[in-house]
Image: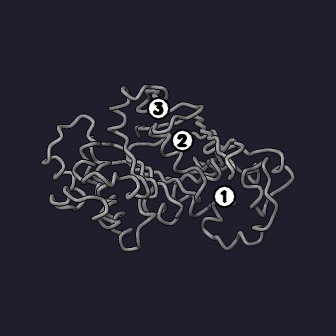
Amino acid sequence: MEEILRCEKISKNFMIKDPLGISKRKLTAINNISLSINQGVNTGIVGESGSGKTTLAKTLTLLVRPDSGLIYYRGNEITKLPDRKLRFFRNRVRIIFQNPYKSLNPRSTVERVIKEAMLTETKTSETVDDILSHVGLPPEYKDKYPHQLSGGERQRVAIARALVGNPECIIADEPTGSLDAMTEIYILTLLDELKKRFGLTYVFISHNLKIIAEFCERIMVMYRGHIVEQGSVEQILKNPLHPYTRLLWNPESEKFVRQQQKYNYGCPFLHRCIFRMEKCFHQSPELKDKENGHLVSCFLYE
């Protein structure tokens, strides 16, 4: 199985200001993350808002540069390459953002949006028509502006833009998060059809574990910038190991500990975990292979 994308121990920090804009503090958005994306295997990254999923997506595509760690494309290390040398990579690994209204320039027509994404292709109207046809939009849509489109249509334009450059891997960051249930089903079906037609590999990011389970073959669970569990869909669904993964399946189980004090050290899930022990207050567990590629970061399994 060929590896498309790999990152090794990447981290990204941001400096954020307090509400009055007086002092700053460091926020670790992703912390020491390693993962591998293999051709033809849809990988899901799941976690609540604020877990670092979007920062990870932007870092994997080098829209944001990691503070530490390495990123490889097809075995070649690309972490510090200048933008002018990343053109081929950015054609082959594309990203779809959650909110298409924010990610599409409101002053640009659909045609211009798609042409601006063409890094090497001949920028013709016929090429735009062909790309739009793949997402079920007629040629006349190329003259429309984002505000003239429904949410589902805007997301189809965002998907069309991601198809430019003949990509092999698309990182979809909450691509159905702002859509109603029926439109969500349509977009998921469209993405699946495009995978079959073009041989695409997806990295699918969502807060919804059930959607991830239906769409992907492997799952990585993120919490506060950490990967706390990863494995095949079957492993994660039939035998979720980390308390946070169980919580994603059954949110009601958190009520017992929701009022507990928060801690800034030890295990990142400490303040929400009903299984915490003395060790959890002082150390952060490492991600270790429990069995057959089922990895978990939790002292319960040591």
Q: Is residue 298 visible?
A: yes
Which marked residue is nearer to the observer: mark 1 or mark 3?
3
Q: Which mark is residue 23?
A: none
Q: Residues within 10 Å of mark 2 (few under 14, many from 20)?
A: some
Residue tagged 1: 241
Question: 104 or 222, which is in the foreground?
Answer: 104
Q: Residue at x 41, y 55 (%)?
A: 102
Q: In the visual, does 104 lie left or right of 24?
A: left
Q: Amino acid at mark 2?
A: Leu
Q: Which mark is residue 35?
A: 2
Q: Residue at x 21, y 50 (%)?
A: 111
Q: Residues within 10 Å of mark 3 (few under 14, many from 20)?
A: some
Residue 261, position in %: x, y?
Answer: 82, 60
Q: Quadrant of residue 216?
A: bottom left
- Say above or below: 274 vs 202: below
Image quadrant for the N terminus? top left
Residue tagged 3: 72
